[in-house]
Image (spheres, coloured by chain):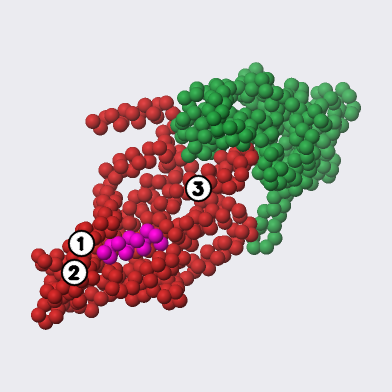
């Protein structure tokens, strides 16, 4: 526990949605999620829109208040911090946002935006220009950009400034919420490499949220796959991509276009993810699952450990693991 | 000549990829748009003229506005028509209409600017606090705002003046008290959307204090709204002041005010139409100029244009 940079236990976020004049319904955006992140590690979180990825990110940085569960940063339970105590802990967990056109104040120069973070760190005014220059060079931007406004920067440049701003407070964890999704593919690779370099140098841990599996395959050490507010599969990145256990994971991976795997049969997912306010009984994935058995319609599968660092929430996958050999080649 | 700024603009776009350049060039943008918009240019020039006239009234006015000239009335005691000595004629008391008009501009501008300034200050504070704090604070402040807003503004002012008694100071206070609600509403809705912007979230995540976030990331974005609504508010305030003075409960006599001049002038309209026409035209032109300038500022400060697609 003590060596984890970030530990999340049973995180639950429910939204109450009003319906009509009276009555409301509860949307279980995040429903009992466990995540752990070691120093210098990258955990990828993947899932379709509405699977609760971004809600996790927002509750980790206290923009959304969770209904249940605990968030532990280092040794401190930060779940219910408020006021000044919360402000002190905030800088240990930073976020790089998806939209590079909205995450920087259009009325502040790059120098002021990064300087604001340096002021939070308590750096004296006369030392800030030097530190701004150092941070800009850290994200491979010329110092001349410091006087620019965000409107004068490209998307990739803005995202680098966002990264520099996050680094300015020397955090333990940086949450990248679709941080490269809005960028061109070529620029995306540059930014991802930059993030990796920074991790090597500073030992910062990343929680990398993305709907794009090829991005996660590139950056993540471990990956958690989410479906309707729950983690359905979790494992080391290499193994998970080489041998996905959950039918949903397989469908997601099959949907990624691949040069080498041309000609392999594409697995198509029918239908839409269910309404989180009204999830189906049993396994929430069963209406779309090609392998659903009777049990899936009745009993909700729990996340079960099936190997070192690997766990899956699927009756079929767990069963095949328990009876060896039939597991190696799950029926397709 | 003209090609210089164009090539400069092209160079900037080439470097920055996105062309939406913000604040630092607002002044230049304003001047450029005035050059292409004669109506706005005339409005702005008229307002400037009005300000100069009001400021330097004692030097510009040909006569003392309160002096009753012996030769200011005809043999039968009627007002003198416009002529070489009294450019806009005299009124029923033998006072110079042009001088009274010029001093009246002082009252109109003073009341308009001060009342709008006060109203804006109240409106921005209430709207920002309500929008940013949300919850019960928002509900309470907005119910108060709605209550004030539900009164017809002129009727409300008349009622308040009836309670406080007419004086220039009270006219200003009453207009401010009735008008702040409009800005409070608009500012609140703007703050509500600003609050959800990622750069505000980013500042919160950094651990910046709420008061600092409001000062640094919220209020600067409200300036365009404040300026636009302020300009329109000045027009409204001038009209309300004129209405109150017309009803005899505005700026106290014998101080000159356009509303009072219209009120007095209508009694002599058939024999001395200049008594009505001069302050009437001045009032119409002033209100029109402020409204047109407000429209022009709205276009100039359109946030969608300014902040690159947001």
Q: Look at the image and give the colour of chain B.
A: red
Residue at 81% over, 26% down: A309
Residue furthest out toward the right: A323
Q: Earlier in the sequence, mark 2 or mark 1?
A: 1
Earlier sequence position, callout 2 versus callout 3: 2
Look at mark 1 in the image and give the residue it sits on.
Answer: B61
Describe the element under mark 1 as helix, strand or loop.
Answer: loop
Identify the residue position indicated by label 3 in the image.
Answer: B219
Q: Give percent across and percent down for residue A40.
A: 72, 24
Disc 2: which residue:
B96
| Depth check, front residue: A122 or A327 | A122
Range of the magenta residues? B103-115
| Nearest to the observer: residue A227 or residue B77 | B77
- Report whether residue B64 is seen: yes
Could you tell me if the residues under marks 2 and 1 are in contact, i.e. CB atoms within 8 Å? yes
Question: As displayed, is residue B256 above or below residue A265?
Answer: below
């Amino acid at each position: 526990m003590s060596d984890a940079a970030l530990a999340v236990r049973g995180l639950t976020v429910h939204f109450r949605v009003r319906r009509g004049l009276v009555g409301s319904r509860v949307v279980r955006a995040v429903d009992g999620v466990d995540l752990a992140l070691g120093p210098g590690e990258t955990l990828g979180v993947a899932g379709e829109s509405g699977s609760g990825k971004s809600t996790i990110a927002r509750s980790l940085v206290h923009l959304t208040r969770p209904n249940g569960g605990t968030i532990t940063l280092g040794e401190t339970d930060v779940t219910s911090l408020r006021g000044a105590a919360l402000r002190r802990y905030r800088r240990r967990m930073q976020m790089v946002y998806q939209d590079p056109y909205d995450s920087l104040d259009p009325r502040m120069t790059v120098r002021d935006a990064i300087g604001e973070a340096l002021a939070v760190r308590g750096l004296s005014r006369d030392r800030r220009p030097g530190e701004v220059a150092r941070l800009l060079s850290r994200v491979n931007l010329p110092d001349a950009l410091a006087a620019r406004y965000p409107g004068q920067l490209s998307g990739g440049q803005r995202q680098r400034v966002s990264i520099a701003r996050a680094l300015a407070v020397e955090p333990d964890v940086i949450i990248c919420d679709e941080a490269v999704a809005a960028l061109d593919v070529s620029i995306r690779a540059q930014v991802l490499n930059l993030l990796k370099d920074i991790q090597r140098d500073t030992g910062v841990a990343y929680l990398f949220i993305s709907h794009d599996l090829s991005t996660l395959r590139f950056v993540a050490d471990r990956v958690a796959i989410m479906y309707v507010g729950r983690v359905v599969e979790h494992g080391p990145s290499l193994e998970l991509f080489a041998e996905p256990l959950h039918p949903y994971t397989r469908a997601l991976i099959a949907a990624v276009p691949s040069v080498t795997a041309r000609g392999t049969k594409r697995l198509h997912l029918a239908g839409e993810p269910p309404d989180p306010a009204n999830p189906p009984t049993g396994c929430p994935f069963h209406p779309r699952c090609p392998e659903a058995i009777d049990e899936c319609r009745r009993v909700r599968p729990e996340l079960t450990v099936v190997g070192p660092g690997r766990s899956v929430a699927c009756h079929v996958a767990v069963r095949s693991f328990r009876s060896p050999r039939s597991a190696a080649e799950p029926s397709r | 000549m003209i090609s210089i700024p164009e090539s400069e603009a092209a160079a900037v776009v080439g470097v920055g990829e996105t062309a939406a350049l913000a604040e630092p060039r607002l002044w230049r943008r304003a001047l450029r748009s005035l050059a292409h918009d004669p109506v706005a240019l005339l409005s702005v020039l008229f307002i400037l003229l009005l300000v100069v006239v009001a400021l330097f009234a004692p030097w510009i006015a040909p006569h003392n506005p309160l002096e009753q000239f012996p030769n200011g009335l005809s043999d039968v005691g009627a007002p003198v028509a416009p002529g070489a000595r009294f450019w806009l004629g005299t009124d029923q008391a033998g006072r110079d209409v042009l001088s009274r008009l010029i001093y009246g501009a002082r009252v109109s501008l003073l009341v308009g600017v001060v009342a709008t300034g006060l109203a804006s200050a109240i409106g921005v504070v209430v709207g920002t606090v309500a929008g940013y704090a949300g919850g019960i604070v928002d509900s309470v402040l907005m119910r108060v705002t709605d209550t004030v807003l539900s009164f017809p503004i002129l009727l409300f002012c008349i009622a308040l003046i009836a309670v406080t008694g007419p004086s220039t100071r009270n006219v200003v206070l009453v207009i401010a008290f009735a008008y702040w609600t409009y800005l409070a509403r608009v500012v609140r809705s703007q703050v509500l959307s600003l609050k959800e912007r990622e750069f505000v979230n980013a500042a919160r995540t950094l651990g910046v204090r709420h008061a600092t976030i409001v000062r640094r990331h919220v209020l600067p974005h409200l300036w365009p709204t404040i300026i636009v609504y302020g300009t329109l508010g000045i027009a409204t305030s001038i009209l309300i002041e004129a209405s109150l003075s017309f009803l005899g409960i505005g700026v106290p006599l014998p101080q000159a005010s356009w509303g009072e001049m219209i009120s007095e002038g209508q009694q002599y309209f058939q024999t001395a139409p200049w008594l009505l026409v001069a302050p009437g035209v001045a009032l119409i032109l002033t209100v029109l100029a402020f409204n047109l300038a407000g429209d022009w500022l709205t276009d100039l400060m359109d946030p969608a244009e300014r902040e690159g697609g947001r």
